[in-house]
Image (tube, coloured by chain):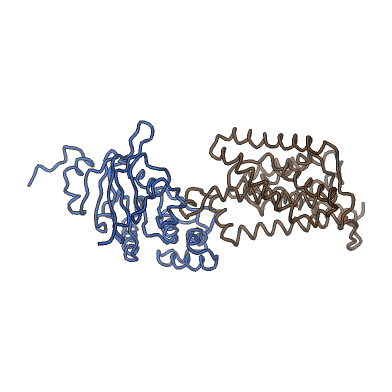
Chain colours: A blue, B brown
Amino acid sequence: MSAPLLEVRGLTKRFGGLTANEDVGFTLREGEIMGLIGPNGAGKTTVFNALAGFFPPTSGTILLDGAPVEGLPPEAIAARGVARTFQIVRIFRSMTVLENVMVGAMLRHRAVPKAAVVARETLDFTGLGRRAHDPAAQLTVAEQKRLELTRALATGPRLLLLDEVMAGLTASEVQEAVELVKRIRDRGIACVVVEHVMEGIMPIADRMVVLENGRKIAEGPPAAISVDPNVIRAYLGEGYLAPGP
Amino acid sequence: MTVELLLQTLLSGILFGLVYALVAIGLTLIFGVMDIVNFAHGEFLMFGMYAAFWAFALWGLDPIVTLPLTTLLLFAVGVAVYRLVIRRITDAPMLSQIFATFGLMIFFRGLAQYLWKPDFRSVDHTIVAGKVAFAGLQFGLPQVVAAGGAVLTTAAVWAFLRFTRLGAALEATAADKEAAALMGIDAQKMFALAWGIGAACAGVAGALLATYYPIFPEVGSTFILVAFVLVALGGFGSVVGAFWAGILVGIVEVMGGFLWDPAYKMVLVLSLYLIVVWFRPQGLMGKA
């Protein structure tokens, strides 16, 4: 068995007196989809920010291919093959759709024409090809989310961190997003998916990690997680625990 | 008042406006990428003029000949100012940023007075001396060369931003530096690059102006006020906007002086500015 693509050990992040993550650990193999769920404020985005290099963890290790990357700046982590999307889309509003994706593609392709070709291919892959020359600011919210994902994909990542790409989408858009994440996985790209939309993440995740108050409270396959008493209590409160069969 | 005289004045305005524009595009580039207003930008221009002057006074080199060196020198000055000062105030409150660049302006002027005396200097002979006649109109060759150089430089900066990888990275950083970092773009490098290019533009303008404009420590003040007007008029961060605004302001300035009274020319320029920001606060080419 090969070494894991990503290994997180004892990840702790404190902001002053607030502990956003405490002793979080998990591993991810190549081409695996991991769901990262938990109630609001559980610390999911903090994990993403640490993984993407937005701030160094207070303590703990993040190993990418066995090499520590914690504390590296985001541009260095991007160069090592980690890409992310934001919960609230952050596309380059002054550019066209194609230009947005080209900026991502330029990480691996220094020649502008080559970056344009790669960006075009990536847009076709995610189904935004026909919007290539529209100003990015004119896209619908669902399309903007898809654009952000396309831009992240264009950086040629091996690990993709998706932060609520399905929130606010209609049922059919969620279905499209689910299919897209599967196709991304089929390209051999591992994904960590933060999601509140359970019907979006449950069918595609190989494994789920559940956070509550910054700590990991459960880990396992989706079917096991959905009946885990700790998880149900975290989401719904004690009163909703099934009294047993 | 003849048509020729009117045309002559109009074209002189455009020629000078193009140089204004070159000063302003450096300012607007820095502002667009970093959201920092560089009050010391006129002093970059002043350094460019003195660099041209001293190369001429000490070694007899023409400002046009030393222009590439002046450009490189000012690029280095811009990067150095970023690394030594601006880097520390990137995320500081706006007031600290204003104090920092305003302080630099005063420091640079003081330094120039101390080192080079407050006297007016000039480059008294240059390879671009003389006049050009065109369809019955006459223009100073230095003015024509300066305007041509300004257009070429503006076009080069525009093409750089539009068609190169670094240009795209600069624009991405301007739009969202954190999202750009996720694309592997080092914001610190982009900020340094913006300061380098911004100062280099002022350096080119300084070298070109040195062929016909007096050189003194406060010379930047003449240009910086107009440059601010152009940046706001053209739309904050818009290089193309600053270019057209430069032409417009150049025309308004000379026509105002010609038709009304030279003493009031800035009244017209600033009134134009007020009218535009009143009806179109994002500037002529800015995005709402």
Residue drawn at the location 64% of the way across and 42% of the way down: B81
**Whole-percent x, y for residue A160 in the image:** 37, 56
What percent of the width, then of the height, locates residue B211? Answer: 84, 51
Residue at the front extreme, as displayed: B59
Q: Position of residue A61 (x, y in %)?
A: 33, 46
Left/right placement of residue A181 relative to residue B137 reads left
Q: Residue furthest left?
A: A245
- Residue B217, relative to residue B152: is it above or below? above
Q: What residue is at 70 percent from the left and 43 percent from the top?
A: B41
Q: How many marks?
A: 0
- In the figure, B134 relative to A74: above or below? below
Residue at 61% x, 40% y is B84
User: As rendered, which of B65 and A146 lies closer to the eye?
Assistant: B65
In percent of width and height, residue A76 lies at: 45, 52
Q: Is residue A204 toward the left or the right of residue B173 in the image?
A: left
* Residue A187, quarter of the rendered image: bottom left
**Outermost residue, top direction?**
A17
